[in-house]
């Protein structure tokens, strides 16, 4: 293979070195280090090697790490950090994982267009009528608008260009107009054009999703306000995630929290001196039918008592799955390790054990994330100038926590392993059963339980709730919190069977807030007028402080329903209020 590589024009140098290639082994093995003449040729070299025997004969490492991520790892720097540069060297002037750090003062400017769209939805062939960037508005012919837009961006010199629907329409539309009129579009600080990445479609969770192309600026950030990270947690959340993942802000804004988790794992493995495999070739362990039945069971569900309940307490485990992964040291290389004999941690109900001799890669990554979230969750409740920043960082890390568990069982995840996924579920089931037993020992009945939450009803003479929480936390070693006490809560039946639906309920907490799950108001495809009707009906029911008062207000809630029905019959509701939103999952 070395001789084949040496004759390639794309290869600059080949060296034989020793490196770690397995996170489960400290031993270094001989590998060929291939240095390309240019970074863009790296993938071409990898594909040539892959075509000469595939990943079975020639496993490839460090192929698909993003360039910005590689650069940060090599120089010990990170996005949104204070850096020093001199004599061709970088130095970070602050700690990457500091909890309190200043955000750079970036100047944003919103870019918007006026398009003549006779069909209502603008198309690429529609005429450009004007543009606005920041507080500067431009108009004229299409070439004049493009020239003036360039001048306005240069005058304002923003650090961040914000758009709405920028990747899907605004940027490609401007690019087409610029090419049509032969006017160079200069939205970045670099004279080169922006970096354009093509869109693609993929299948996920039962539906086909189209991901628009990416239009990245050089020398400035182009952030689409509709992208997940910016939409959910603004610049503070994006900066938090980008600092941790070492993914460039424009990339991170367009990627999922799961990609960030994967990047954090890659970063830690690289710092440990371990190469990162390109195409994971570890198959799922062979299992008997009994093993599959025992292992593939998901989280624990306690069927709810259908109906209206008064005075229930809801207890929630904080970041249950990530906490289990840290507490029980769950990682691909620690599950069924060969180094532990009698001191291994058994997985309840399964034929797996967990290592106690060394801490795994994934728990080390997650521990940092959990500590940060715990701090931000606390600080966002304390008044101060940074309260909103702490809240945005907490929101971003919350989404990271939601995805980290799923990635353990995702077949394409770099450090995923389905057996880890099964072990986490098994431990979570055992913990929730133990929680129920403790609650019952303190005089409480379990009305409903699902994965990481439990609803309790106090029997006569039951203990107050705080000792119950402390007992559960002490027994499980995990953080459990009181979500609240409900004035009343209604658990709804399944529409087909009539048994309790696992996640359909609505209830009013003592603090006056509603908690809604699974009803039409929470769905994305519900017509606007139905949302408005349910809000009005819940507004009537919110006046009830007890179950008895709830029943008294049902006639008033029904009156709201009759009023809405009459408006429908009278054609008083605009047609647009009846629009149903559906995602296409098959070819039309």
Image (cartoon, rainbow, N blue to C red):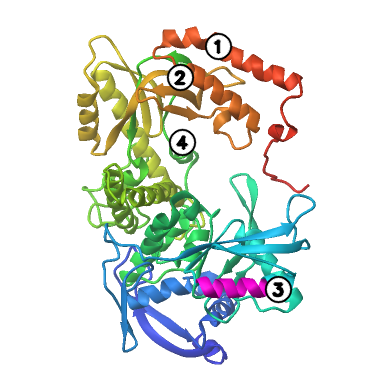
Mark 4 near mark 3, Cβ–Cβ under 8 Å?
A: no
Q: Which residue is mark 3?
A: 144
Q: What secondary structure is marked by label 4?
A: loop
Rendered image quadrant of residue 488? top left
Magenta extent? 146-156
Mark 2 Cα shell of 10 Å, populated few (<14), some (14-19), many (≥20): many
Q: Which residue is mark 2?
A: 542
Q: What secondary structure is marked by label 3?
A: helix
Q: Residue shown at 38%/71% (left/top)? A: 21
Marks 3 and 2 sit apart, C-alpha to C-alpha, by 57 Å
Q: Is residue 281 visible to us here?
A: no
Mark 1 Cα shell of 10 Å, populated few (<14), some (14-19), many (≥20): some
The verdict on residue 33 being magenta is no
Q: Nearer the viewer, residue 65 or 328?
A: 65
* Mark 3 or 2, closer to the camera: 3
- Picture coordinates of residue 410 (x, y %)? 49, 52
Q: Upstream in the sequence, badge 3 or badge 1?
A: 3
Mark 4 near mark 1, Cβ–Cβ under 8 Å?
A: no
Q: Residue shown at 30%/65% (left/top)? A: 96
Marks 1 and 2 sit apart, C-alpha to C-alpha, by 12 Å
Q: Nearer the viewer, residue 77 or 460?
A: 77
- Picture coordinates of residue 236 (x, y %)? 39, 56
Q: Which residue is mark 1?
A: 556
């Amino acid at each position: 293979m070395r001789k084949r590589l040496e004759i390639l024009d794309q290869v600059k140098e080949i060296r034989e070195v020793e490196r770690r290639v397995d996170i489960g082994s400290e031993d270094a093995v001989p590998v060929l280090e291939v240095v390309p003449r240019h970074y863009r040729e790296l993938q071409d070299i990898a594909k040539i090697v892959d075509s000469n025997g595939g990943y079975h004969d020639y496993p490839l490492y460090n192929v698909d790490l993003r360039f910005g991520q590689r650069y940060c790892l090599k120089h010990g720097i990170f996005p949104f950090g204070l850096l020093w540069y001199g004599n061709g060297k970088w130095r970070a002037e602050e700690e990457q994982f500091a909890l309190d750090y200043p955000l750079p003062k970036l100047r944003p400017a919103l870019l918007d267009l006026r398009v003549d769209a006779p069909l209502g939805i603008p198309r690429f062939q529609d005429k450009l009528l004007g543009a606005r960037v920041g507080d500067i508005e431009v108009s004229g012919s299409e070439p004049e608008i493009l020239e003036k837009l360039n001048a306005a961006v240069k005058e304002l010199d923003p650090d961040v260009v914000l758009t709405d629907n920028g990747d899907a329409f605004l940027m490609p539309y401007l690019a087409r107009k610029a090419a049509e009129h032969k006017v160079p579009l200069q939205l970045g600080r670099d004279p080169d054009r922006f970096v354009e990445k093509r869109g693609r479609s993929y299948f996920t969770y039962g539906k086909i999703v189209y991901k628009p192309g990416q239009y990245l600026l050089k020398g400035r950030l182009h952030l689409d306000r509709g992208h997940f990270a910016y939409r959910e947690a603004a610049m503070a959340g994006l900066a938090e995630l980008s600092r941790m993942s070492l993914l460039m802000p424009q990339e991170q804004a367009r990627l999922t929290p799961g990609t960030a988790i994967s990047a954090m794992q890659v970063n830690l493995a690289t710092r440990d001196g371990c190469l990162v495999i390109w195409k994971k070739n570890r198959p799922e362990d062979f299992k008997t039918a009994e093993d599959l039945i025992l292992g593939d069971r998901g989280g624990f569900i306690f069927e709810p008592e259908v109906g209206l309940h008064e005075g229930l307490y809801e207890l929630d485990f904080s970041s249950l799955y990530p906490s289990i992964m840290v507490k029980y040291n769950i990682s691909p290389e620690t599950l069924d390790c060969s180094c532990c004999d009698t001191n291994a941690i058994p997985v309840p109900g399964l034929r797996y054990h967990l290592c106690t001799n060394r801490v795994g890669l994934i728990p080390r990554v997650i521990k940092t994330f959990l500590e940060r979230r715990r701090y931000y969750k606390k600080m966002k409740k304390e008044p101060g100038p940074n309260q909103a920043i702490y809240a945005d960082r907490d929101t971003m890390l919350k989404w990271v926590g939601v995805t980290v568990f799923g990635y353990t069982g995702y077949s394409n995840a770099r450090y995923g392993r389905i057996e880890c996924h099964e072990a986490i579920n098994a431990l979570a089931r055992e913990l929730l059963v133990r929680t129920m037993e403790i609650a019952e020992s303190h005089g409480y009945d379990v009305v409903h339980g699902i994965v990481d939450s439990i609803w309790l009803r106090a029997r006569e003479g039951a203990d107050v709730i705080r000792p119950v929480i402390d007992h559960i936390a002490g027994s499980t070693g995990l953080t459990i919190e009181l979500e609240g006490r409900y004035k009343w809560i209604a658990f709804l039946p399944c529409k087909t069977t009539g048994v309790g639906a696992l996640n359909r309920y609505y209830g009013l907490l003592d603090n006056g807030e509603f908690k809604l799950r699974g009803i039409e108001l929470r769905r994305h495809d519900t017509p606007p007028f139905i949302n408005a009707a349910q809000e009005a009906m819940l507004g009537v029911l919110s006046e009830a402080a007890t179950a008895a008062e709830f029943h008294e207000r049902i006639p008033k809630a029904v009156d709201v329903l009759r009023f809405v029905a009459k408006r429908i019959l009278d054609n008083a509701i605009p047609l647009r209020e009846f629009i149903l939103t559906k995602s296409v999952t098959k070819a039309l």
